[in-house]
Amino acid sequence: MIIFYDASCPLCNIEMQHLKDADTKHKIVLEDLNRHDFSTRYPSVNKNKAMAILHAQLPSGEMIYGLDVTYQAWKTVGKYRWMKIFRLPVIRYFADAAYLFFAKHRQTISRLLMPNTQCTNDKCGVGKKGDQ
């Protein structure tokens, strides 16, 4: 499974690093949408659309999006099985709406929840107080 994500988003980046840490069988590949060669390496992935909503490619070649990616990724590494509740029909509608809100505002939400966190080269760390 290849996950295409925004590594400049602290919350997104930290989530992907936790996922990768749990991936002991190396079933997940993380691809930062911000890499200079991303469009060359993945010409079939629309970077603008992938920046708007999380994208992943399954081993079969099928593309999945949003919370389906999150659920499938954690399922693949054998963690957080309870997340399947977010894919139940009625809950799915509200969960997807909440995810779309988060995706649209992820940078602002990250700055509010993690004001001193900065991401570079697929890694996030805490900067000095007052750093922008």
Image (spheres, helix red, strand yellow):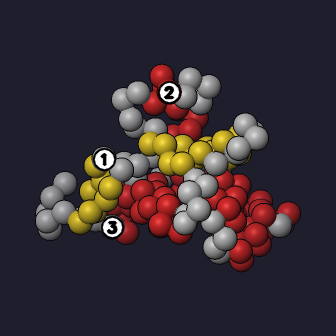
The x, y position of residue 108, in whole percent, is: 39, 56
Q: What residue does disc 3 label?
A: 114
Label 3–label 1 contact, CB within 8 A: no
What amino acid is at disc 2? Answer: Arg
Query: Which element is circle 1 on?
Result: loop
| Image quadrant assignment for residue 95 | bottom right
From mark 2 to mark 1, how far is it between C-alphas? 17 Å
Amino acid type of the residue that numbered disc 3 sits on in the rendered structure: Met
Residue labelled with disc 1: 121
Callout 3 secondary element: loop
Residue 129 image-quadrant placement: bottom left
Relative to residue 83, is residue 119 depicted above or below? Answer: above
Residue 45 x %, y %: 59, 30
Can the viewer see residue 47? yes
130 lies left or right of 86: left
Give residue 49's position: percent from left, percent from top. 58, 35
The disc placed on residue 5 is none
Residue at the image point whose x is 67% and y is 62% from the top: 76
Q: Which is nearer the N-term, disc 2 or disc 1?
A: 2
Q: Could you tell which of marks 3 and 1 lies nearer the N-terminus?
A: 3
Kindly report the distance in space between the C-alpha atoms of the residues bearing marks 2 and 3: 31 Å
Could you say which disc has been placed on residue 41 in the image?
2
- Is 130 on the left or on the right of 77, as rendered? left
| Left or right placement of residue 1 versus residue 131 in this view | right
The tag earlier along the polypeptide, 2 or 3, is 2
Measure the C-alpha gap from mark 3 to mark 1.
18 Å
Residue 78 percent coordinates (x, y): 66, 71
Q: Residues within 10 Å of mark 2 (few under 14, many from 20)?
A: few
Q: Quadrant of residue 17?
A: bottom left
